[in-house]
Image (cartoon, rainbow, N blue to C red):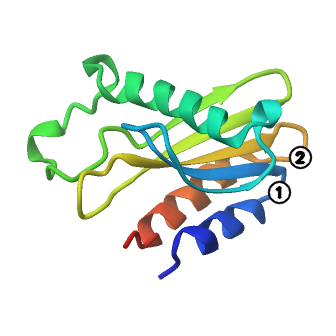
Amino acid sequence: MPGIDECLLEAMRLPGARGAALVDWTSGLALGVVGESPGGDQEASAAEAAELARLAAEHRAFASDAEDGEEADDPPLEDLIVSNRDSYHVLRFVRTSFDSSVFLHLWLARAEGNLALARIRLGEMAGRLVLG
């Protein structure tokens, strides 16, 4: 089972990957980063992505209808996708044994990337990720 560094390096092997990070959405801290970062500042990008993730996670409008049967440690969402003119940002929430307050953030170039493939692979990576 891969740790943070291995998981992020695997994310960077996806076609069009420009940067990847594992972020705690409650604090905005990057637990690991690799590659480029929008705006050139990895810590600022992590904090900004965490703000978006926290906003979506804390509002019922985005919650699953099947919440009653979910375990307490399940992430509140599966993923968020933000697209702009030249890239995608995929935020994949990670289930953990503690509070599930982390997500993988993949910055993907739109021209070279494959959004469907990125979602599938990030889901697989999130399921295998070991946080110690």
Q: Would you say 129 lies left or right of 16 here?
A: left
Residue placed furthest toward the right: 111
Count neighbours of disc 2 (C-alpha within 10 A) and say few if under 14, some if 14 to 19, many if 20 or more: few
Amino acid type, callout 2: Glu
Whole-percent x, y for residue 117 in the image: 68, 54
Q: Secondary structure at mark 2?
A: loop
Which residue: 82% across, 57% down?
Answer: 15
Specify the label residue 37 is tagged with. Answer: none
In contact (CB < 8 Å): disc 2 and disc 1: yes
Residue 113 or 126: which is nearer the viewer? 126
Specify the label residue 15 is tagged with. Answer: 1
Residue placed furthest toward the bottom: 1
Whole-percent x, y for residue 97 in the image: 24, 64
Say which quadrant the C terminus sits in: bottom left
Which residue: 72% across, 42% down?
Answer: 107
Q: Of marks 2 and 1, which one's residue comes earlier in the chain?
A: 1
Which residue: 30% across, 39% down?
Answer: 76
Whole-percent x, y for residue 38 in the image: 77, 34
Question: What's the CA distance linking mark 2 and mark 1?
Answer: 6 Å
Amino acid type, callout 1: Pro
Q: Secondary structure at mark 1?
A: loop
Q: Which residue is mark 2?
A: 112
Whole-percent x, y for residue 82 in the image: 63, 27
Q: Is residue 109 above or below residue 71?
A: above
Residue 44 or 68: which is nearer the viewer? 44
